[in-house]
Amino acid sequence: MSDVIACEGLSVQPGSMQRTRVELMQLADGATVSIPLMVMNGAKPGPRLYLGAAIHGDEVNGIALLSRALKQIDLQQLSGSIVCVPVQHPLALYSDHRLPLAQFLKSPLDQAPADAWTCFPGQEDGNLAQVVAATLFRLIRQCDFFVLDIHTPTRGGRYVPIAILPPPGIGPASRVAEDMGRALGTGWIMRGDRGMYVSDGILCVEATRAGVPALTFEIGEGGRLEEDSVATGAGCVLNLLRHLKMIEGAVQAPATTHVMRDFLGLRARRGGLLITEVKLGQAVKQGDLLCRVVDIFGDEVEIIVAPRRWSLCSSDDIEHCHHR
C-alpha cells in the first residue's frame, strides 16, 4: 500500500485522486488567478511523476493529451503518484497566445522576463513570469523522480513528436532523462548541447539540474486541437508510465527512432506564400527541394533546398549520431 500524499493542502489517500487550484496572484479587481492541479495517488508504492502542459497559452494539444492518457489509468493498479498541471500558465491560455498579452502593456519592470518557461526556478516576489515559474517549481521539487513538460510549437510551426533532452553535462539526472526520452516512443529524440531548449532557465534544464530528471516533449502545431497529435501524445505518456513501472504493459516502441543533435532553421528571403514540397518527418538529402515561395500573383520568386546532408541513426547509435 502506498502512503498518503500531502500536496498543496491536499491529503490524497492511496487509490484516490483529488483536484484543486493553487492560487497564483490577484488581478487588479481582486479576482484570483489560480493554477489547476490534479493529484493521483496509486494504491501501490512507486515514484512520483510531474506532468505539465500549456505553459504557453496556444499549446492546447498538451492539455487534451494529458486528460486522455490519465483517464485510462486505474488508480487501484497505479504504482506511485502523478502530480498533473494541465494548464501551467492560465493567463496565457485566457489570451489564446504564447504569452499573456497584457504583460507587454505594463511597465518595463514587469515586462521582462516575459516567458515563464525560460526563467526557472523562478522568483516568488518577481514579475508574472517569475511567479508562475516559482509556483510550478515548488510543485516539481515535490516530485522526487520525474518531470514531463509538454509543448507545441507556436502558430505556424509544427513538429513531429519529439523528446528533447536536457544537456548531458548537468548531473546524473540527465542520464535518467535520456532513458525517459527513449521510453516515450516518439520516434524522434533531440540530444543537443546548444540552443534554447538546453539554455539555463528552461524548465527541464533547471529541474534536471535540481536532481529531478526532466524532458521537453513537443508535438503538433500551436493554436489548434489536433486529434492525431492528441492520440499519439497520450500514447507517449502511457509509454513513459510503463517504462517507470507505474502501470502494467510493455513500452510500444516506434519502428525507427531518429536521434538528432541540433535544429536547423531556414528562412525565406523573398516575400510571398510558402508552398511545401516534402512531408513533415520525411528524410531528405542535400539539395532536395523543400519548399517554394510564390508571390501574390502566383509567380515563383524563391526555392529553398536542403543545405546539408544528415545522417540519421537509431537510438542504439546515439553516441555516434552526427550531421555533416
Image: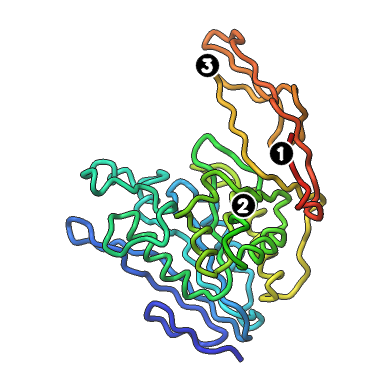
Where does residue 112 sit, x and y in percent of width and height? 31, 46
Residue under circle 2?
164
Q: Amino acid at mark 2?
A: Ile
- Height in image: 79 above or below 271? below
The quadrant of the rendering that contains the C terminus is top right
Towards the viewer: 119 or 64: 119
Residue tagged 3? 272
Residue position for label 1: 281
Label 3 and label 1: CA atoms lie apart by: 24 Å
Q: How many residues crowd mark 2 within 10 Å: few (<14), some (14–19), many (20+)?
A: many
Q: Position of residue 259 (x, y in %)?
A: 73, 48
Q: Give me the residue at 74% from left, 42% from top.
A: 322
Q: Which mark is residue 32?
A: none
- Mark 1 secondary-structure assignment: loop
Mark positioned earlier in the residue sequence (3 or 1): 3
Q: Position of residue 123 (x, y in %)?
A: 33, 62
Tell me which corner region of the image, top left, top right, bottom left or bottom right, holds residue 290.
Answer: top right
At x 51%, y 72%, the residue is: 83
Image point 60% across, 58% down: which residue? 169
x, y (%) of residue 276? 65, 25
Question: Helix, strand, or loop for circle 3?
Answer: loop
